[in-house]
Every structure is written in C-alpha cells, then in structure tokens.
C-alpha cells in the first residue's frame, strides 16, 4: 500500500510503515507542510491494523538538516510583509511565539503519543529540527558517520523539543546544547543519545531487521510495552518538559544574538547569517573520547 503526500513518502509493507521525509533538495528541511503531513502519516500508521512498527527516515543525503528557514530569510524588519491578518497570530508577542512553537510541537509529539513503536533511521545530517523529530522516536539507529547536533543553539534560541537529557544525561546534554557542537553517529551511540550506530552501507538492513522482529509481535503487546516505558518518562517529567521547552525557546528568542541573526538573514541572506553564527566555531564538532585539541582554525586535530 502507498499513499500520496507532497513532502513525505508513505508505504506499508510486511508489517511496517515506512515514512520517508522527502525534500532531498532541501536536505529534508522541516516545513510546516512536512510536519503536518508527518503527523497525518503517523496517525494513519497507528490506526492501520496491518502496521506493527514505523520506520522514519530521510531521502537523499540527510535525515533532516533542521527546520526550513526560508520564511526567516525573507522576513523584513518593518513587518510590512506580515502575512497574518489581525485575526490570526503572527510573531508580535512572546505568547504568539510560544503559541506557534507549541502548535508545531503538537504535530511532532505524535511520535511519542502514538501506540506503535517508531524507529528513526538516521543518516547524513540530523541537525536542529531533525533532532527534535529523531529524539522523540522510541529507538534511534544511526550511521556511524551521521552528524548529530543543534547548531542553532549558538544564536537562534533554545531547543523547542528537549529529550536530550533523557537519552544521554545532563552533562552531555549541556555539552552539546551550550555550544551547538555536533557529534558523529558512532559517538552518539557511545553516550546513549542513540541506541546504536552501524556502517552507513548496512544501516537500512539493520533497521529493517529490527522491524522484522517487531512485526512478529502482537500490536497490543507492542503498545503496552512502549506505553509503560513512556509513562515512566512522563513520571520523570519528559512530556511536561516538552511543553516547557517551547516556552523556553520563545524566551530565548528575546536574546540579542537572535535578533542579530534575524537582521543579517533579512538584510544579507541566510547564508551570511549562518556564516556569522558558525564560522568562529571551526568544524563545529565535539569529541566524545580523548582531548579536544584544535588547530588555529578551530578544527579538531
């Protein structure tokens, strides 16, 4: 079975639904349309008695390089191009910002709330919004050479979804969030941010093999076992923290560096703004094991 969407691919086969983020020319940047379609596909899979497990993956060179920043780059500082009418929320106030962040978050939280398990198949870039999606999944299997992190934390706000601490603990969460540095899939496995990593050429086989095993389990049992673990996460505050993360991101958007990033993006273009944000961080990488010795450019030696 296949269903037609504009920004994702959806197919059901052998007890699994494969949902593929399908904007490869944009490195699967998360537009609101894509997030809405992803939400629809997840609930379709959860409602389909033929589906035992969902595989979430990306087309092309990346799982997802983050949120689609095109609207930000085209925004003018005087508000003259505001597409919202007086009836609907724009970005005028703190509460408007939090409301819009929460609206997008509700779409992603289907991964956590749905009854059936979701496996993230992570390759290439898994950055910013890509991590917001992947870290909500029940299991994450990454390619050894995947690049995982949240560089926008350097100058664009806080993290609007926040499952990091529940995967890898407070210190590694802070190490990555306070710098926006990235780690590889292999390093992510070492700190528990992902379940495991494998060579890129066997990633699909690894994920499909795990899905084969889940497809042999009664969906009622899969649901019971997923949900009891998620309830434990909820008792530790995981779901409440997601709601608070959206408000915290709105708070972080008031920082001077966020306004400066927006100014540069609007006046000089998104590429210039990203260069301003990232160039001083060299290769932008953290090192999980061993000392972080860097050359004069800020690249790990």
Image (cartoon, helix red, strand yellow):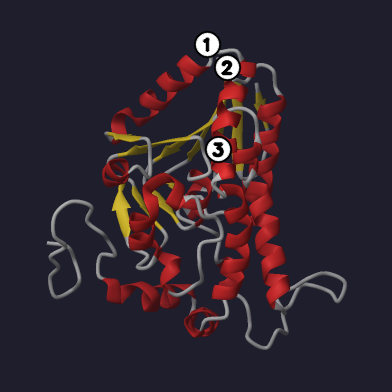
Q: CA distance from mark 1 to mark 2?
A: 8 Å
Residue 1 location in percent, x, y? 65, 21
**Few, some or many residues within 10 Å of mark 3 (<14, 14–19, 20+):** few
Q: Is residue 224 above or below residue 84?
A: above
The residue drawn where x is 57% and y is 61% is 245
Q: Which residue is mark 2?
A: 15
Helix, strand or loop at disc 3? helix
Residue 136 location in percent, x, y? 53, 43
Q: Quadrant of residue 143?
A: top left
Left or right: residue 289 compared with residue 123: left
Helix, strand or loop at disc 1? loop
Q: Which label's residue is closer to the chain start, 1 or 2?
A: 2
Spot the residue most to the bottom. Answer: 78
Residue 70 location in percent, x, y? 57, 67
| Mark identifier at residue 232 | 3
The residue drawn where x is 26% and y is 59% is 286
| Mark identifier at residue 216 | 1
């Amino acid at each position: 079975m296949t269903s037609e969407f504009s920004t994702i691919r959806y197919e059901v086969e052998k007890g699994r639904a494969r949902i593929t983020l399908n904007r490869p020319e944009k490195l699967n940047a998360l537009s609101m349309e894509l997030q809405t379609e992803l939400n629809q596909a997840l609930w379709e899979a959860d409602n389909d008695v033929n589906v035992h497990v969902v595989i979430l993956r990306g087309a092309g060179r990346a799982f997802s390089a983050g949120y689609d920043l095109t609207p930000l780059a085209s925004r003018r500082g005087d508000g003259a191009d505001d597409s919202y009418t007086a009836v609907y929320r724009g970005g005028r106030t703190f509460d408007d910002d939090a409301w819009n962040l929460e609206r997008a978050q509700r779409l992603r939280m289907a991964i956590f709330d749905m009854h059936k398990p979701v496996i993230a198949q992570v390759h290439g870039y898994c950055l910013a919004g890509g991590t917001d999606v992947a870290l909500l999944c029940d299991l994450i299997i990454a390619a050894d050479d995947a690049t995982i992190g949240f560089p926008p934390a350097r100058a664009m706000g806080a993290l609007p979804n926040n499952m990091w601490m529940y995967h890898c603990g407070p210190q590694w969460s802070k190490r990555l969030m306070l710098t926006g540095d990235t780690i590889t899939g292999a390093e992510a496995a070492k700190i528990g941010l992902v379940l495991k990593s494998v060579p890129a050429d066997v990633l699909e086989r690894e994920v499909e093999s795990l899905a084969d095993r889940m497809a042999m389990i009664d969906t009622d049992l899969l649901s019971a076992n997923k949900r009891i673990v998620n309830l434990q996460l909820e008792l530790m505050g995981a779901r409440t923290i997601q709601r608070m993360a959206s408000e915290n991101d709105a708070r972080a958007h008031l920082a001077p560096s966020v306004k400066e990033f927006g100014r540069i993006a609007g006046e000089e273009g998104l590429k210039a703004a990203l260069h301003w944000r990232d160039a001083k961080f060299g290769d932008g990488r953290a090192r999980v094991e061993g000392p972080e010795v860097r050359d004069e450019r800020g690249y790990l030696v």
